[in-house]
Image (spheres, helix red, strand yellow):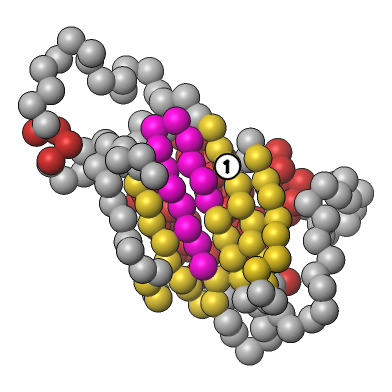
């Protein structure tokens, strides 16, 4: 991992109440990089779709947890959502499925994620499912560091400065 990356990982209960927390936590991490609101919105919406699917289709009826990992850089991010599995046999996941008819109330999650992420992969992890999405972005204009400015290292030592490394070495339960 680059020293200019921000990494965060957490585990939440597999309930719809967790969705607000996840969106807020991811928004706080994204806010530390000079991403446009549109690029941050792409990741947040894709995360909401992946987590909603994990809660509804990839978690036991009696609860369970979902793990979220994100690594954010100035030029992009990787988002990983992992569920525990629902106990069913092999899940029926087709990340390349075409969108459903306009009158269907279901089946739009993967088409939405696929349209927002630059790369989407789905894999089995134990009895659960892992969705990995990569997002490429262009930093907002005016946020590039001045190449002529002297580098005394003070900016990278101050809390909250872009480029700081925020790493949680273990997944935290919330």
The quadrant of the picture occupied by the C terminus is bottom left
Would you name the residue on which mark 1 appears? Answer: 134
Residue extending farthest to the top is 148
Q: Residues within 10 Å of mark 1 (few under 14, many from 20)?
A: some
Name the quarter where the N terminus is drawn: top left
Q: Which residues are magenta?
A: 67-79
Report which quarter residue 134 is drawn in.
top right
Q: x, y (%) of residue 101?
A: 91, 49
Residue 54 lies, with reference to residue 79, above or below; the image says below
Tell which of 103 and 109 is nearer to you.
109
At horizontal 64% and vertical 57% (from top left) the residue drawn is 131
Mark 1 residue element: strand
Q: Residue at x 13, y 41 (%)?
A: 158
- Res. 3 visible in picture: yes
In this view, the residue in front, 9 or 29, is: 9
Classified by dominant secondary structure, the portion drawn in magenta counts as: strand
> Going by the image, does 105 lie left or right of 23?
right
Task: Give the residue displayed 63% in from the left and 36% down from the top.
Answer: 118
Q: Is residue 137 above or below residue 60?
A: above
* In the displayed structure image, the side of residue 145 where residue 34 appears, left or right: right
Q: Report whether 111 appears left or right of 18.
A: right
Q: Quadrant of residue 146?
A: top left
Q: Residue furthest bottom?
A: 62
Can residue 116 be seen here? The reply is no
In magenta stretch: residue 68: yes
Residue 15 lies, in percent from the top left, at: 57, 76
Q: Is 78 a magenta residue?
A: yes
Residue placed most toward the observer, 3 or 30: 3
Q: Which percent across, then down, holds residue 141?
A: 38, 18
Task: Residue 132 in the image: state x and y as whole percent.
Answer: 61, 52
The image shows a total of numbered marks equal to 1
């Amino acid at each position: 991992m680059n020293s200019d990356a921000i990494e965060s990982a957490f585990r939440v209960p597999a309930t719809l109440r967790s969705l607000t927390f996840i969106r807020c936590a991811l928004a706080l991490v994204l806010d530390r990089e000079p991403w446009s609101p549109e690029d941050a919105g792409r990741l947040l919406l894709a995360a909401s779709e992946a987590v909603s699917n994990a809660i509804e289709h990839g978690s036991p009826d009696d609860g369970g947890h979902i793990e979220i990992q994100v690594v954010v850089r100035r030029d992009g991010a990787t988002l990983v959502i992992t569920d525990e599995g629902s106990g069913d046999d092999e899940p029926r996941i087709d990340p390349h499925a075409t969108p459903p008819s306009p009158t269907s109330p279901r089946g739009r999650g993967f088409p939405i994620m696929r349209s927002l992420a630059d790369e989407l992969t789905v894999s089995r992890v134990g009895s659960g499912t892992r969705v990995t999405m990569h997002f490429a972005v262009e930093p907002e204009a005016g946020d590039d560091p001045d190449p002529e400015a002297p580098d005394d290292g003070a900016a990278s030592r101050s809390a909250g400065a872009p480029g700081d490394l925020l790493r949680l070495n273990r997944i935290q339960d919330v």
